[in-house]
Image (cartoon, rainbow, N blue to C red):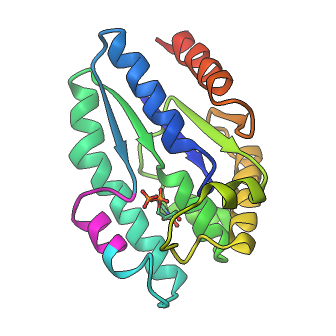
Amino acid sequence: MLIVFEGADGSGKTTQSKLLYKYLKHKGLKVILTKEPTKGPIGRLIRKNFLYSKFNNVYVDAFLFAADTYSHIESVIKPSLAKDVIVISDRYFYSNLAYQGAEGLSLDYLVKLHENTLKPDVVFLLDCDVDTCMKRLKKVRRSKYETRDFLSKVRNSYLMLKDKLDDKIILLNSSECINDINNRIIMEVEKLL
Ligand code: TYD
């Protein structure tokens, strides 16, 4: 099973993906928690050279993040699924649709770029107002995407893609209490197990 967490920076997806990981592990299931940008060579390249630079070219961003997703699938996701390990990913290609969509590329174009990816069983889309997201982002060094205006575009593009895609995307209001959201996520995952 492939479970994905998505949402704008500061939406709480890292907290929720960790809580779900702990829950499944505690149940004695085989599970891994992974993320994008990955810790592999392309993910490292993205973090080192592009996330904090002033260099802006949406095609470079889209292709690099897409390449990171495809290599993530080959090196981590597929081998784990083949061993019946549940894979939880903190971000997946939906981040590319939302962020590079917010940078100006069309959803159709971005969907095409990811047409050979693996469809997840479920996507939890954590959504909350941008001011709450900004408050949660206490980092000293912010990536080029972590501005109020940009995150507001990202939020809109996530909501748009949820409406337009047929994928199983569950929208959760992440300004609610952490435990309530966690319980809702567990309920949905239990249905799939
Ligand atoms: P983030 O999850 O915030 O990483 P960190 O672990 O450092 O907190 O992801 C880094 C940024 O990359 C985030 O602002 C979203 C952006 N991003 C894209 O623009 N496109 C993508 O396809 C992915 C996976 C991430």
At 49% from the left and 90% from the top, the residue drawn is 54
Q: Is residue 122 left or right of residue 49?
A: right
User: Any magenta on residue 14?
Assistant: no
Q: Is residue 31 left or right of residue 89?
A: left
User: Any magenta on residue 43?
Assistant: yes
Pick whichever, 184 or 101, lies toward us.
184
Measured along the vertical axis of the image, is residue 28 above or below residue 39? above
Figure quadrant of the N terminus: top left
Q: Where residue 166 appears, x then y in whole percent?
A: 67, 38
At 62% from the left and 32% from the top, the residue drawn is 168
Pick whichever, 176 or 122, lies toward us.
176
Q: Is residue 135 left or right of residue 71?
A: right
Q: Quadrant of residue 181?
A: top right
Q: Where residue 142 appears, x then y in whole percent?
A: 52, 72
The number of callouts visible is: 0
Extreme bottom residue here? 55
Q: Tell me which segment is drawn in magenta.
A: 37-47
Q: Is residue 97 left or right of residue 81?
A: right
Q: Where residue 108 appears, x then y in whole percent?
A: 65, 63
Q: Quadrant of residue 82?
A: top left
Pick whichever, 118 or 33, lies toward us.
33
Task: Characterize the magenta stretch by its predominant secondary structure.
Answer: helix
Q: Where residue 9 appears, x then y in whole percent?
A: 59, 57
At 68% from the left and 63% from the top, the residue drawn is 154
At 35% from the left and 13% from the top, the residue drawn is 26
Q: Quadrant of residue 37?
A: bottom left
